[in-house]
Amino acid sequence: YDTYGFPLDLTQDALREKGRAVDVAGFEAAMAEQKARARAAWAGSGETRDAAVWFELAEAHPATEFLGYETEVAEGVVLALVVDGAPVAEIAPGGEGWAVLNQSPFYAEQGGQVGDSGTYLKPEGAGQITDTQKMAGGLFAHRVRPEKAALKPGDALELRVDHARRAAIRANHS
């Protein structure tokens, strides 16, 4: 789960079909230990005051499912928003902050690779995604800039990776 974000409920379903069960108490204990180790080892990117919010969000939400190997356009739901290291109820047009999504085609910066950028669309308006970072617990944080409508948790978005930028970045790193 920690490495790939494979959901516990799907593991339980797969094993149930084979007449086996998951040690849920053991899973939860192992996850608590891993979260404690991750907190202790977290170095962050120099923004240590912001690190606490990502651990809190990682405890509240599952890892972001990465869809970018299959597609550059996908739907996602906003799980949480962060501005200046604190959760917020919305990001207004013209504002900027981070959006955590349940799934995303955007590659998150890690291991020296640059994070993807692009756009999001929702019925009330569009916005820019200027960066994507991998945070604690496998959460992908998307740097968002709403243009015409506020962004709020629960919003369903159509996500579009900037294909030309992704191709140019990958070409420069190969």
Image (cartoon, rainbow, N blue to C red):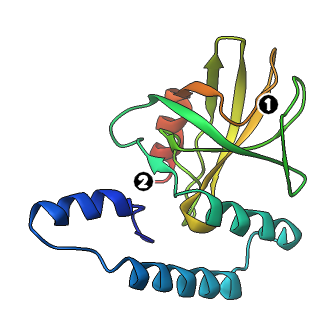
Q: Position of residue 55 (x, y in %)?
A: 70, 69
**Rendered residue at 74%/72% (across/down):** 44
Image height check: is 32 above or below 84?
A: below
Image height check: is 55 above or below 17?
A: below
Splitting the image into 4 quarters, where does residue 160 fall?
top right
Residue 110 seen in this snapshot: yes
Q: Nearer the viewer, mark 2 or mark 1?
A: 1
Residue receiving disc 2: 174
Q: Position of residue 36 (x, y in %)?
A: 63, 86
> Crowdedness of circle 1 by 10 Å Cα count: few (<14), some, many (20+)?
many
Horizontally, residue 144 falls left or right of residue 165, namely right
Q: Amino acid at mark 2?
A: Ser
Give the mark nearer the N terminus: 2 vs 1. Answer: 1
User: In this view, which residue lies farthest toward the left?
Assistant: 18
Marker disc for residue 133: none
Q: Quadrant of the N terminus?
A: bottom left
**Rendered residue at 40%/85% (across/down):** 26
Image height check: is 15 above or below 117?
A: below
**Rendered residue at 47%/46% (across/down):** 170
User: Label 2 to label 1, Cα distance in Å?
Assistant: 30 Å
Splitting the image into 4 quarters, where does residue 85 fall?
bottom right
Camera-side residue of 17 and 60: 17
Residue 135 seen in this snapshot: no
**Rendered residue at 69%/82% (across/down):** 39
Q: Amino acid at mark 1?
A: Arg
Q: Secondary structure at mark 1?
A: strand
Horizontally, residue 10 falls left or right of residue 53, namely left
Camera-side residue of 51 and 89: 89
Camera-side residue of 94 and 15: 15
Marker disc for residue 145: 1
Q: Secondary structure at mark 2?
A: loop
Residue contact between numbered discs 2 and 1, judged by CB atoms under 8 Å: no
